[in-house]
Image: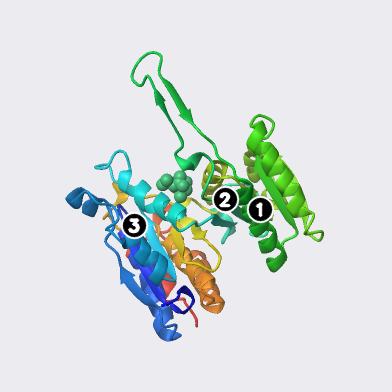
Amino acid sequence: MTMKTSKKIAVIPGDGIGPEVIDAGLSVLNHVNDARNLGLELVLFGWNADEYLRTGISIPPGGMDDIRNNYAAVYLGAFGDPRVPDMKHAADILLGMRFQLDLYVNYRPVKLLNERLCPLKGKTRQDVDFVIFRENTEGAYVGMGGHFKKGTSDEIAIQEDVSTRKGVERIIRHAFEYAKKTGRKSVCMSDKNNVMRFGGDLWLRTFEEVAAEYPGIEHFHMFVDALTMQMVRAPEMFEVIVTNNMFGDIVTDLGAALQGGLGMAASGNIHPGKVSLFEPIHGSAPKYAGKDVANPIGAILTAAMMLEYLGNTAEADAIESAVVAAIEANETTHDLGGNLGTKAAGAAVLKRVEL
Ligand code: IPM
Ligand code: MN
């Protein structure tokens, strides 16, 4: 079976609140799949901390190839469990998929769905509406480096920050292509090239070269410290932001807060045209696990993003509209000011999906 014809979705609920929010997302996804005859085949994967602790294996042999060869997408909850303090299984599975499936685009929209959810004073839905593209296969995440004289007073630790021309160019190009396709007017590249001279030089040169191919789109550079300030002070100045892996990790948590908190934000780990992975930005929040309190909206919007990636744009839009309506009706979990549990908040969205 080739990727293009596959309609199989690997569902990996993971740890902590992952299974609860994925359940809510699946109820919406299953409804849309049935009502619109999308033909998606959802396959449950039990890769999580329990399984890792039981077997010592995070990904069963052949598991990654199975996903690579037979699936259209992965729908993932969250990883992280206090019983696995080094996060070994999380690193193997989540970072493993990002690297081994070469999911170089981390797509993290920052879109305010209701003014009252924004922690900033006087900002409207139009003001908080931009997209962050985080490079997802390089940077400080590659795990290159090491210890020397570990555990002694002379200890040295080196953690490399890797940028390749190919890696930098493809994420920057993706940001400009996205801007062109969606009618966004500008692309901001953010880094710290006043200090990190080598990588920064490569990023800036590549940015200027790629930008020259898109004369209709404005481009500007901003140091990442200034970016965090401007995202809070004047989010309306941004349409598309592109940045490296680590800075992207940090500024997208800030982006989630601008939309109403970590429980609201969706993300895609994408290799255009290939199997891609969709997950809410929030983590496994072990202390809330099993309590029916977690906000399911990030997971539901993630399902919508996955549908959009698979070409089902109308269905994705219908889900987003249902989320907007549920928030307007204040039928949400506590973090958004409502008084519903995870299940009921999911049902409040589901009943508003108009296909
Ligand atoms: C994210 C998370 C991950 C990351 C962790 C869980 C490894 O924070 O997806 O933003 O740092 O990329
Ligand atoms: Mn993060």
Location of the N terminus by quadrant is bottom left
Task: Where is residue 344? Give x, y as percent.
Answer: 35, 67
Q: Is residue 20 visible?
A: no
> What distance separates the C-alpha of mark 2 from that of mark 1?
10 Å
Residue 25 at least partly seen:
yes
Marks 2 and 3 sit apart, C-alpha to C-alpha, by 23 Å
Q: Amino acid at mark 1?
A: Ile
**Mark 3: secondary structure:** helix
Is label 2's Cβ within 8 Å of ligand 1?
A: no
Q: CA distance from mark 1 to mark 3?
A: 31 Å
The residue sitting at 30% across, 53% down in the picture is 15
Mark with earlier residue (2, 1): 2
What label sits on residue 18 in the rendered view?
3
Q: Which mark is residue 68?
A: none
Could you classify mark 1 by the number of other residues whose Cα lies within 10 Å: few (under 14), some (14-19), or many (20 or more)? many
Of callouts 1 and 3, the N-terminal one: 3
- Dot 2: within a 10 Å radius of its alpha carbon, few (fewer than 14), some, or many (20 or more) residues? many
Q: Is residue 332 left or right of residue 328?
A: left
- The x, y position of residue 181, in whole percent, is 69, 68
Residue, disc 2: 134
- Residue 328 horizontal side relative to residue 54, left or right: right
Colour scheme employed for the rendering of this structure: rainbow
Residue under numbered circle 1: 172
The residue positioned 31% from the left and 62% from the top of the image is 62
Using residue 123 as the reference point, say whether residue 135 is left or right of it.
left
Q: Mark 1 near mark 3, Cβ–Cβ under 8 Å? A: no
**Toward which corner of the image does residue 77 lie, by quadrant?**
bottom left
From this view, report whether residue 145 is shown above or below residue 21: above
Please, is residue 350 above or below residue 331 in the view? below
217 or 7, nearer to the observer: 7
